Amino acid sequence: MSIELYGDDLHSCQLFSGQVVRTEVQTCQGLVVHGYHAALIDPGGTATFNRVLTQLGPHLKYLDYLLFSHQDPDTTGALEGWVLATRGKVVIPELWERFLPHLCSPGILDGRVITIPDAGLELPMGKSRLRALPAHFLHSEGNFHFHDPVARALFSGDMGSAIGVEELCTPVESLGPHIRYMEPFHRRHMSCNKACRLWADMVREIDLEWLVPHHGPPLHGRAVITDFLEWISELECGTDLLTAADYRPPGPVRHQGKGER
């Protein structure tokens, strides 16, 4: 399934979703095309590789970039396949570059990697560009979201994700009914409220029509995006919720007596 988020004679932005069976973790992939340049965002693991590869069609030979927001297997699991099937450069947070040899055969990444410094990066695509925006600790320590200024779309990795939604290609335009699909995930996977607030403050300054998470349907329209930014700014999550009860050994504690082993 796919959604066109934006399209004109030169530039297009698409979302692919529902590429695996319902019992598996659903992921979404983004495709940005500008003339004879293209970028694939968070390509996914081996479960999605063949289906996404097929959907790229004629854009496959123009793929400049394979963009990875962070290192999780649902984004990088099929890395070797994508490197072999395309000419695209692997764009990944600098923090995770040293882990790439665990995902690919020796030598195939030589000259193919662009690392994103902590402050972010702009990537040229013809006369356009994509921006890698800092999203550290949401949920990965080294993490970036990808902004397409032409489509006014932010591919937001795990931020904004929803689990258990049936209609993956139906954009969300009202936040209230959708929160029940987002709240458990964000409380567990986002590191703390401070990181959420700082990220939301950054995103409020960007003109957006789409917020596109890696799991679940996209959020469409400034109103619902604003509501989401308000909600996530107030959410207690991750380390905010920890207590001493979360750091206890399982089972009763038994002290060894003298002479026992």
Image (tube, rainbow, N blue to C red):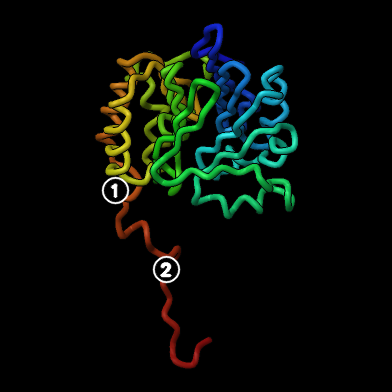
Kind of residue at disc 2 = Pro
Question: What residue sits right under mark 2 in the picture?
Answer: 252
- Left or right, 204 with respect to 32, comes to left
Q: Sequence order check: which comes first, mark 2 or mark 1? A: 1
* 12 shown above or below 215: above
- Tell which of 195 and 92 is nearer to you: 92
Crowd rating for badge 1 (residues with CA inside 10 Å; few <14, some 14–19, many 20+):
some
Kind of residue at disc 1 = Asp
Residue 58: where, in percent of width, then height?
71, 17
Question: What residue sits right under mark 1 in the picture?
Answer: 240
Q: Residue at x 33, y 18 (%)?
A: 224
- Left or right, 195 with respect to 62, comes to left
Residue 141: where, in percent of width, then height?
43, 49
Element marked by disc 2: loop
Q: Residue at x 28, y 39 (%)?
A: 198
* 203 shown above or below 187: above
Q: Quadrant of residue 245?
A: bottom left
